[in-house]
Amino acid sequence: MAGVVDVPQQIQTDAKIVVKAITSVFHLKKTRTEPAREFIALKEINLEVKKGEFLVLVGPSGCGKSTLLDILTGLAQPTSGAVYIDGNKVTGPALDRGIVLQGYALFPWRTVRQNVEFGLEIKKVPKRERRAISDNFIHLVGLDGFADRFPHELSGGMKQRVAIARALAYDPEVLLMDEPFAAVDAQTRESLQDELLRIWEATGKTILFVTHSIEEAVFLGDRVAVLTPNPGTLREIVKIDLPRPRHNSDTRSSAEFGWIRRKIWELLQNAPHESRHHLNAVPVAEAISPTASL
Amino acid sequence: MENGALRKAGVILLFLALWELAPLTGLVDPLFIPRFSGVLITIRDLYQTGEFLQHTRISLLRAFSGLAVAVVIGLPLGLILGGWFPRIQQATEPLMELCAVANPVILAHIIIFFLGIGETAKTFIIAWLCVWPITFSTITGIRSADDSLLKAARSLGLGRWQLFRLVVLPSAAPSIFTGLRLSAGYAFIMLIAAEMMGAGSGLGWFIVQSQESYHVLRLFAGATVITFLGLLTDVSIRLLQNRFAFWNSEPGESFHLQGRGIV
């Protein structure tokens, strides 16, 4: 039960985000086929994200990565443990974190500009200032000339750009992204990834990015936190030493990219010792080929 | 031009042409179905007397006051039940559905007993039938507010009232308009029923009078005017819908069909 373990309201830390011993248990109700049971979505997750870092959470569906993101957003409470931002415990949603969701979640009755300005309206920023800020972010995501369009007039990729601009507009220090590019086609996805890195480098935000794509994780992240399901556990954090700035065209074709991707893939297979041994026997070309993980 | 508008207009014209030609060629007895042009001429003549205009005005007033009462009751009822009291809404749903199919005309004698035979009873009968589509569609609209939209809004720390005003209410707008259109249609149907019981004016009364005195042309004139007014109301509401709830009428990917992350 929450509150049984005493969690301090503040901690001393240099990290931007501290995830401390997060456990999340759901009580599933009895169904016709199954009795009532407990489902451990997350078990003892510990994680630190540095200021300005790009951290990716990767894992298969059911590993609790979206639950973790909900807890970080403040929309869900952990069963035990706590999340700290700048050393302060997260108790609910606030404007210091921006979120971008898979389904775009744009307000269909608002234009691109009105969507981008939504958070600013909540923040009660005066109209003229709002306009300047939204102009700036609409430009940043490359949607000049689309400010007065409605979401249904945009392509999936453009919608996601609007969602990113909306999350950035009210200037949160942390950007939480929940599989933001999962619903767009492969080509758009790659260009959005390039865009995101460019925006990240331009704004210096701390980004926590959730995906189930290993490729995406390796391409984007400074570090990749690998989650495995049943119960959702943090298996390992892999540091990605690929040089920046990264571009889809050349980063993906590097041998190192293939090796890291292979390593994460094996971590997800849940058999670390065997497969590491196995990996040595695999020809390099196969290990680094883009289809090796499929 | 709207997609297929030409074809739609063509079908209407074809229907009117058939209406004109069928009595002319003796396909139907003009004593039962008069020619369309004859009906139009009768309407023109009727409006020159001024009395018919009075009937039209009274009927419109009755239909709209019934509809207005329905909106004033149904909209807040739907918002409150759908937005704040889901348990009560669930519990009362079967009863409300029962009320929605209960025909107020059958209960006319009870209504007249309580409300008399004047305008109140007529407004009540119309409002009774119109209130349910609005209530139900408002509840449905509020329920169908997209989870990810709510999530995105809640992540900004919006309070319950802000969430309701800025996200839930606009989300419900397309559904509310759909209910309103349905109700408006009912209003014009019930108008005739209401005016058939103890009225001395209105288009419904005029139609009954014409029927009883075998004035087929007048009967058709009254019916055509009512149909036209109902149609006009529907088109007006649809225009409002396109103006204020345009996003749902767009074809292609609907915003609440987007994938949602589970766990």
Image (cartoon, grey):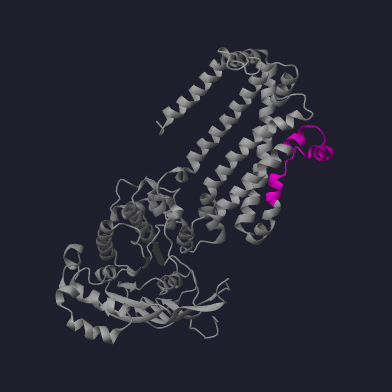
Camera-side residue of A26 and A68: A26
x then y, percent, for residue B194:
73, 32
Is residue A281 shown left or right of residue B135? left
The answer to whether residue A125 of the structure is visible from this angle is no
Q: Is B162 situated above or below A71?
A: above
Q: Count the marks: how many?
A: 0
x then y, percent, for residue B45:
63, 12
Camera-side residue of A274 and B223: A274
The secondary structure making up most of the magenta span is helix
User: Does the magenta portion include B99?
Assistant: yes
User: Does the magenta portion include B137?
Assistant: no
What is the magenta range?
Answer: B96-123
Q: Quadrant of residue A1?
A: bottom right
Q: Quadrant of the C terminus of chain B?
A: bottom left
Q: Quadrant of the N terminus of chain B?
A: top left
x then y, percent, for residue A131:
37, 50
Q: Quadrant of residue B196?
A: top right
Q: Which residue in the rendered view is the most extreme toward the right?
A: B113
